[in-house]
């Protein structure tokens, strides 16, 4: 029996100890009417490990697509081989949340190091141990801000990922917040300070500010942060953590810095994996510490004065505070945060900055060569990080399908989420692309738009 | 041996150049946006990284190294085969926005998984997107809210939760802006029906139940409870964290539940990762069908498609940016394929057999269980109230002492209503030999508590650190390393 | 610098401590004439990890071939996922030979368990810790037998792998042994007792006996073993260890059992890997213990009486005995033996027998369906394990090339090594093959031989 | 904590059915050949296997967990990237007899590796097939024999080996049926040329040398040695185990060697695996070219082919059934690609810098080195003769005590000619910080040897076992577990 170690003899000895004839008797307290009579019909017969692996291999091979130029919130990066060899060690992989601190120092110290790296990267006072993903972390940050400020209005730029906006919607819906979508400049592709005038004087809990934004464009963070603080609103930064190694850290935005920074940690060592598991991170100024959701690890000492680590500030959490907790989050995405900790340790400040620079460089090169093609137009004027928006002379879906045939995943089709942009395509190039890869894309697109 | 922080190993200027292309880059076009400081991250060699985290990992107990009878957590064996299946390069490298044409393989897995879970739970439909049990709970309660709202029923502001419930239940109710009304448990471990009857009414949005409950017993009058709640227009939420106990033996759908969440990272053998990632799919009956969170995988003809808000206008919406923790879903899918139709009920049989057997051995040895007349489900509670009174040794002390003997501690102090409790869940993947060995050590510690209580109270003695100071940790908060 | 942790500052401090200006001074004792002046011209510029992996991926993809029905000494088997996840752990992977016993109990106990499993599987008294591969192990066994018997003649059946025979040749050449090749029956495909008559009365040190033999055919082991012992020769069994779980163990052959058993451990968890690393195993009766080459682990106690493991009987080995050692072997194939230990633990006696039976069953089925095809003839009459020989109506090389186009690696072409057999093809089917796989082969072959 | 044997965990009848297809099989046609007994192998669950071997592995020191300055072993960092490269499914699943059309990718790697190694060593051609250093040595000596035989030169029956040589050198000479003639080393660590001159003659088949020698110094008069040996018609064999010291700095081919073997598992960063697999390619100059062992990869036009005995009639032949340890070759290939032309000499620079620096720190602290006037190569010797005399603490004791401080012991008692020696090789992948920490502990143990010698003599104290009884192990031989 797969994964059941009992021999018939063991079973009989155990039944005998319990003075019962069969395991059926163990379920005697389940009312007869509720006992499942037949079998689970939808479940197929057991496969052997080899047959299962062969099936899964076929399925995964079936989905093999070309060079990936899609971004839109999930990014292809080089993942050093070290990471998953270590993260996949049983001691990390098969441990539970580190409740028994003395038997969990590995996980606890790792998370403490994670918190330190994230807080240092964001230049904020503290970090929690991880959230589910960037979108849900942002939703929790919005709740946190409205709780802290006791106000219900939150400004949400349309340059924020539509998926993040939908997630905020779902998660904050029960609290009937006033979520105000801030339009962007069709010329620059970002929020312009002037356009915020309209919201001045309102009771704003927070302004959410993505950097880079969903179009890859760099927002005017300093001015917008100062504006938010002038409105007595919190500034919630939603950032790409890899980009943050190169770009201004949220804690240094404007005069006083962002108050909360969240984002998706995927670029730090999580494979694309169809969208998950990734992890959300959340950092903030210490003023908001007691509002922070999720687990936090602290450094302490043992009875002999030796350094050790424990879960701390648990009075915020569901298992202690129940209906008065800061969030219901329990399991988080610890393993992915472990991967990120190793990623940041391996690359270090220089490696991360260099990687971010390579991304930028490749995207710039690709944008230049693609926008030279007839039928292609770069539509936003503001600088970008590693993604950019192109307007095509043909419907995006058709072009993407043709690119796919040429072995290229050309990008994310914006025409659904942003119909006003027309045939708009969001293209991403990271450090994984060689010059040859970039050329392959331009050549293929040229061919398609010519033909 | 304590291990220095990676920051203390750091030496400025150290790096592994092979990890990043060393070509020149030009970021002058975005110079106004650039960071001026060097982020305070470690600067260490690849070998230093490998050594640091390898050694750190060795300081963990884990299923792969130790018996880990943590109640309510189902720390069963995490198959390496399902880990390998989910780690196939084709799966790892797939972008969530790959075109449908290049997504039929993965969608086939997810679609079938939805169907399996519906069949296992006896519900109508499943959404896999919640990222953990708690997010599944939120999704479930949000659907309950959406349902009442869709009927214009705005009075319902309360969710009923038994006092034995897991903390996420009331917290999820709170996240959905419901007031929580707690009801007590009877001396036999079942819900107090009279209290329930008194609690329900027009304000009742729903009740959240775990069955078998976190007390390690099956709620025998579940059908009656369902009737009581449904009669007042409320719905029934099932916390599926304990599904391991009844897999293929009984189904929440048949008990009258309207919505349930599952913990794939418990029942379906996916690893816990030191705290996550998990996956908490929700399954619903007919009532809540329109409200399921998106995305959902559907099959149109012989093609799989992903349903969005356009296809499901009444959906509560999306809970994360993409599809949820797909890697965990793939593991659960592979797990179900490995166990198959016959294997799933066997899980419940042996999980329950192990729990009842261990309980019997411990009771025979003099341990106190709060529900001695009841069958254990896949887990059971031992109360050490007597031992605390007589020897001064608490549940915490017992737990710590177990570590010295190479066993992870059971869950301690949960559920809160049983004093000095250990919640013990052996799971089906542990052998009789292992369980006998655990029982033997429990009995030994009981003897120690009497003969040498201090040994127990100051445990652990053989871990990398002695007992840690929680109070200092909270008072003199040190949660981020700072450069001296 | 890849894998060099020194910062410039570290380097300067170290040079200063040594009172030298540059690392050049460290090489001052190398005569100037011998100092390499230029660069290593053949070595390309460094690649990044990602670029290297991409190159290697392309190279490995380039070689992707179809369903594998080749055997001939290396066999495709299902490898439980557990094995390489554990064997790949740094503690096993990056340890040296366990000279420091107290810091190497993991490797030492594993090898002790390995030795126990192999000896038990072979039904012989003892096992060493591993040899390079099956062929070189057999060569060492031949040397061991000639040393023990103080005779120079060794009978080597032509049913033994030609590669094994060549290896024996190379390794024993300096000792000018009299290696006598014993021909096989063209009818049965094995050595017939009657044909051994010719060698009776000669001064034979050993008879080598493969089971199954290179053709997959099962030798008449009991009779041949007894014959060898009647000649006062040693019987060296060369066996497939997986088959041995199902077939008579060497230690039980004939009246007294084989004296030495060797073979390649590859079927026990080593991937095909283009031919290596695999490992050789070597077991023997205790009479020959002091002649055994290679490392041996023994169980002992520490100063407190606790059980522990050490390398033992080292007086046979090169590092102690130098020119008087039983062999020059130093590094062996410990990691592959570790994989085999885990393989045998996972499958257990029942799983290994069942796997061997599935191999046999599949091979039988395939042989039946292939030999029904016009232009195909099964040439040997004796029973086989999981390989069999077919004679084709067309040259084997041409047929194999066509099968390859149909996604099938059809087998090993015997026409080079055994020209007298004609267009002979050695085909293998293991437990990895489904009925569908077998059918694909028959259909493709039918098509090819018809066309 | 000692871990029970897997046999002691075994419970008859336990098995993991998912590992083998459970379909019926029929072996009645070979019933006369079948085994009647059930092989005495463990019967355990998959979890038991995982737990057993995971926990066992944790009892090892390894490069990934500890500084491992084992002299003559080059325990450098084993890159995970090269491990991944060699573990690509396309490589793992390739059968050695795949058709040439499906082998161009792998042959390209091996062909290039041959060329790289030829360039690095300054030799003409390379065969990758030997499976370890010792098999490379055998191949080399067998080629030397073949060369003399090919010239009808049958007198040559001796191989000269310095007393400092590694044990495999004389043993390999023996394997090739040569008599071994040992020559002494001078007080400065170089070979005694007078003794050499006296030893050579018409019987001399070759001399086997390691340079830098295993004494941790470069043999300065190597050109003279080459002349002496060549003059009498002998050949020069280079043991390349120490190549890390001179990588890209000097080449055996330029020194006059006719044949060399390399240890890919030392110089080229492939893992040691607890004792193997390694890979010991041989490289030859013009003289021995025809005798190289097969197979060898060649390029004909733009196609790679594998040369066999037909192409190389004078080859000594084949050393194993297939191509050798291809997986290790792929790792070495990937390693060279990662380090590149500039990276290889850097290895020698930093390996040598680390060794000389550590030697300096230890000498300054009062340790005795036998060749104080010499530059260390990538390793050096400390002799603890004085400490043994004065405190009763031996080299073995020092080594064991190091374990307590989290450092693997250096090589002890090799080379045999230096009493109570530790052969210390830090490698280039260790940081100054790590080396300083090691030096500090060495100094601490030196102090302990004086203040508390018993502590050192009874070390280790913190390992899973205390000092083990080698004598009992050899006397009361227990090398195979038997059922009681
Ligand atoms: C009964 C019960 N419900 C819900 C949860 C929450 O699950 P998760 O941690 O996946 O959010 C748990 C987890 O411990 C639980 O035991
Ligand atoms: C100097 C020297 N030569 C030869 C060898 C033998 O190499 P292998 O163990 O790979 O056979 C070694 C290994 O320790 C060595 O140090």
Image (cartoon, coloured by chain):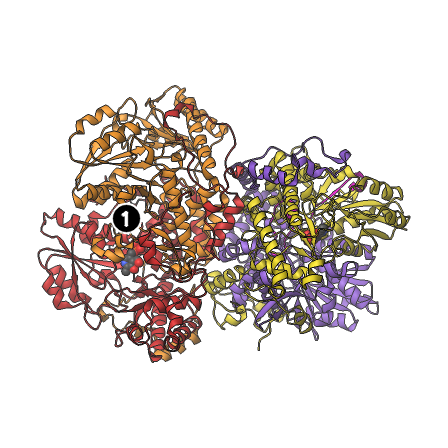
Chain colours: A orange, B red, C purple, D yellow
Tell me the magenta residue range: D264-289
Residue A296, placed above or below residue D472: above
Is D451 included in the stretch rendered in magenta? no
Relative image position of residue A239 (x, y in whole percent): 33, 36
Residue D442, placed above or below residue A269: below
> Is residue D304 shown left or right of residue A187?
right
Q: Residue at x 40, y 39 (%)?
A: A267
What residue is pinned by disc 1?
A: A293
Judge by depth and name the residue closer to the eye, C184 or D126.
D126
Relative image position of residue D414 (x, y in whole percent): 71, 56
> Is residue B51 shown left or right of residue D214?
left
Residue C180, placed above or below residue C405: below
Which chain's residue wears label 1? A
Residue B46 in sight here: yes
Relative image position of residue A200 (x, y in whole percent): 17, 29
Of the 4 image quadrants, the one containing the N terminus of chain C is top right
Element type where label 1 sits in the image: loop
Judge by depth and name the residue closer to the eye, C312 or B208.
C312
Q: Quadrant of ligand 1?
A: bottom left
Residue B105 in sight here: no
Relative image position of residue B180 (x, y in whole percent): 16, 56
Is D276 included in the stretch rendered in magenta? yes
> Is residue B305 shown left or right of residue D249?
left
């Amino acid at each position: 029996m797969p994964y059941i170690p009992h021999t018939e003899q063991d079973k009989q000895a155990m039944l005998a100890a319990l003075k019962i004839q069969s395991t059926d008797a163990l379920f005697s307290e389940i009312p007869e009417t509720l006992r499942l009579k037949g079998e689970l019909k939808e479940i197929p017969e057991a496969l052997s490990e080899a047959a299962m692996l062969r099936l899964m291999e076929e399925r995964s091979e079936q989905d093999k697509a070309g060079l990936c130029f899609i971004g839109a919130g999930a990014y292809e990066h080089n993942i050093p081989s070290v990471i998953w060899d270590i993260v996949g060690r049983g001691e990390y992989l098969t441990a539970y949340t580190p409740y028994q601190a003395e038997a969990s120092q590995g996980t606890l110290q790792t998370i403490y190091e994670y918190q330190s790296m994230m807080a240092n990267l964001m230049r904020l006072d503290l970090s929690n141990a991880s959230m589910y993903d960037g979108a849900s972390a942002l939703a929790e940050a919005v709740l946190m801000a409205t709780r802290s400020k006791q106000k219900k209005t939150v400004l949400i730029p349309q340059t924020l990922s539509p998926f993040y906006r939908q997630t905020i919607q779902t998660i904050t819906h029960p609290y009937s917040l006033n979520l105000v979508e801030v339009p962007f400049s069709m010329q620059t592709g970002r929020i312009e300070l002037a356009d915020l005038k309209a919201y001045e004087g309102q009771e704003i809990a927070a302004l959410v500010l993505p950097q880079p934004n969903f179009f890859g464009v760099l927002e005017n963070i300093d001015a917008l942060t100062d504006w938010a603080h002038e409105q007595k609103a919190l500034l919630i930064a939603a950032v790409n953590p890899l980009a943050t190694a190169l770009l201004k850290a949220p804690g240094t935005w404007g005069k006083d810095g962002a108050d909360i920074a969240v984002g998706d940690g995927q670029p730090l060592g999580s494979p694309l994996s169809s969208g998950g598991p990734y992890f959300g991170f959340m950092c903030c100024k210490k003023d908001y510490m007691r509002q922070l959701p999720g687990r936090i690890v602290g450094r302490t000492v043992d009875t002999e004065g030796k350094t050790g680590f424990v879960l701390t500030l648990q009075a915020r959490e569901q298992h202690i505070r129940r209906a008065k907790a800061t969030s219901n989050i329990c399991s988080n995405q610890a393993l992915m945060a472990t991967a990120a900790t190793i990623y940041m340790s391996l690359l270090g400040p220089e490696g991360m900055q260099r990687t971010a620079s390579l991304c930028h460089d490749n995207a710039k090169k690709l944008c230049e060569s693609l926008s030279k093609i007839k039928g292609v137009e770069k539509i936003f004027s503001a600088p970008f990080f590693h993604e950019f928006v192109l307007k095509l002379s043909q419907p995006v879906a058709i072009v993407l399908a043709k690119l796919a045939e040429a072995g290229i995943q050309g990008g994310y089709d914006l025409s659904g989420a942003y119909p006003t942009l027309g045939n708009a395509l969001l293209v991403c190039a990271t450090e994984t692309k060689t010059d040859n890869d970039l050329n392959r894309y331009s050549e293929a697109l040229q061919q398609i738009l010519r033909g | 041996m304590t291990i220095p922080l990676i920051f203390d190993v750091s030496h400025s200027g150290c790096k592994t150049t092979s990890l990043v292309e060393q070509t020149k880059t030009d970021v002058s076009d975005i110079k106004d946006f650039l960071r001026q400081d060097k982020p305070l991250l470690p600067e260490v060699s690849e070998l230093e990284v490998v050594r640091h985290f390898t050694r750190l990992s060795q300081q963990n107990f884990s299923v792969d190294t130790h018996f880990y009878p943590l109640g309510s957590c189902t720390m069963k064996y995490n198959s390496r085969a399902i880990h390998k299946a989910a780690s196939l390069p084709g799966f790892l490298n797939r972008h969530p926005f790959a075109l449908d044409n290049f997504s039929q393989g993965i969608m086939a897995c997810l679609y079938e998984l939805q169907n399996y879970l519906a069949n296992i739970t006896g519900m109508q439909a499943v959404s896999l997107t919640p990222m953990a049990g708690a997010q599944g709970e939120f999704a479930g309660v949000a659907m309950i809210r959406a349902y009442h709202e869709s009927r214009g029923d705005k009075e319902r502001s309360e969710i009923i939760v038994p006092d034995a419930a897991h903390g996420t239940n009331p917290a999820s109710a709170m996240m959905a802006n419901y007031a929580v009304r707690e009801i007590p448990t009877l001396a036999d471990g079942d819900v107090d029906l009279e209290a329930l009857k008194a609690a329900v009414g027009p304000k009742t949005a729903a009740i959240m139940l775990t069955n078998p409950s976190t007390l390690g017993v099956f709620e025998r009058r579940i059908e009656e409870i369902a009737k009581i709640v449904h009669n007042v227009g409320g719905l029934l939420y099932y916390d599926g964290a304990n599904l391991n106990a009844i897999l293929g033996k009984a189904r929440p759908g048949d008990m009258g539940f309207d919505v349930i969440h599952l913990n794939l990272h418990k029942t379906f053998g996916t690893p816990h990762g030191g705290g996550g990632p998990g996956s908490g799919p929700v399954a619903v009956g007919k009532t809540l069908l329109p409200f399921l969170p998106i995305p959902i995988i559907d099959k149109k003809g012989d093609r799989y498609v992903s349903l969005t808000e356009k296809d499901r206008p009444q959906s509560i919406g999306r809970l994360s940016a993409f599809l949820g923790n797909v890697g965990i879903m793939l593991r659960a899918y592979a797990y179900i394929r490995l166990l198959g139709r016959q294997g799933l009920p066997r899980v419940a049989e042996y999980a329950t057999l192990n729990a009842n057997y261990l309980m019997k051995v411990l009771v025979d040895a003099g341990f106190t269980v709060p529900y001695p007349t009841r069958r254990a489900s896949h887990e059971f509670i031992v109360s050490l109230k007597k031992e605390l009174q007589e020897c001064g040794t608490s549940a915490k002390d017992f737990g710590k002492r177990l570590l010295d003997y190479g066993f992870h501690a059971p869950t301690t102090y949960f559920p809160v209503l049983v004093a000095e409790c250990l919640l013990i869940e052996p799971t089906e993947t542990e052998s009789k030999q292992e369980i006998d060995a655990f029982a033997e050590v429990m009995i030994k510690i009981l003897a120690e508590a009497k003969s040498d209580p201090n040994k127990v109270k100051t445990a652990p003695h053989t871990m990398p650190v002695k007992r840690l100071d929680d109070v200092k940790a909270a008072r003199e908060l040190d949660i981020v390393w700072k450069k001296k």
